[in-house]
Amino acid sequence: MKVLEQITNGAKLTADGENCILSIEQPENAKPKQKGTTGLYHFALLVPRRSDLANIVNHFIKKGIRIGSSDHLVSDALHLNDPDGNGIEIFVDRDPSEWE
C-alpha cells in the first residue's frame, strides 16, 4: 500500500493510487495495547486472485517478514502483525464450488 493522503495524526492508504482502502489514525496520548486485554483483533484485506496472494508471499520472503498461513476451507489466508502488534490477514476466496 502507498500513502494516498497524509494528515497530522494519520494517513489514508491505497493500493491503486486512487481509492482509500485503509485509514489509520494516531490518537493523542495513545497507549500501547496491553497483552490479555480487548482491542482490535485484526483487519483483513481481500485480494482478487490466488496469484496476488503468491506475489505477497514472495514480497514478504524477500523482506524477511514473518508470516503465518491458514486454510479456512473457503479461503486461503496469510497472517502477520503490524509494528504495534495488531493482526493483519490477507486472503483470497476460493470459488464456492470448492468450499468444504
Image: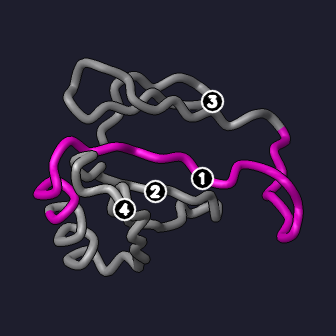
Residue at which label 1 appears: 42
Q: Secondary structure at mark 1?
A: strand
Earlier-in-chain disc, 4 versus 3: 3
Query: Relative to the observer, which residue lies in front, 32 or 71?
Result: 71
Q: Quadrant of the N terminus?
A: top left
Gap in angstroms between the C-alphas marked 1 and 4: 24 Å
Q: Which numbered tag is attached to residue 100? A: 4
Earlier-in-chain disc, 3 versus 1: 3
Residue 97 horizontal/vertical position (percent): 22, 49
Q: Please tell me whether residue 57 is drawn above or below residue 21 in the rendered image.
A: below
Tag 4 near tag 3, CB within 8 Å: no
Nearer the observer: mark 1 or 4; the answer is 4
Q: Is residue 76 magenta?
A: no
Amino acid type at image mark 1:
His
Earlier-in-chain disc, 1 versus 4: 1
Residue 100 horizontal/vertical position (percent): 36, 62
Tag 2 near tag 1, CB within 8 Å: yes
Query: Relative to the observer, which residue lies in front, 37 or 49?
Result: 49
Query: Relative to the observer, which residue lies in front, 77 or 3?
Result: 77
Gap in angstroms between the C-alphas marked 3 and 2: 24 Å
Residue at which label 3 appears: 9
Residue 93 horizontal/vertical position (percent): 30, 49
Gap in angstroms between the C-alphas marked 3 and 1: 21 Å
Earlier-in-chain disc, 2 versus 4: 2
Nearer the observer: mark 3 or 1; the answer is 1
Nearer the observer: mark 4 or 3; the answer is 4
Q: Which numbered tag is attached to residue 89? A: 2
Q: Which residues are magenta?
A: 29-54
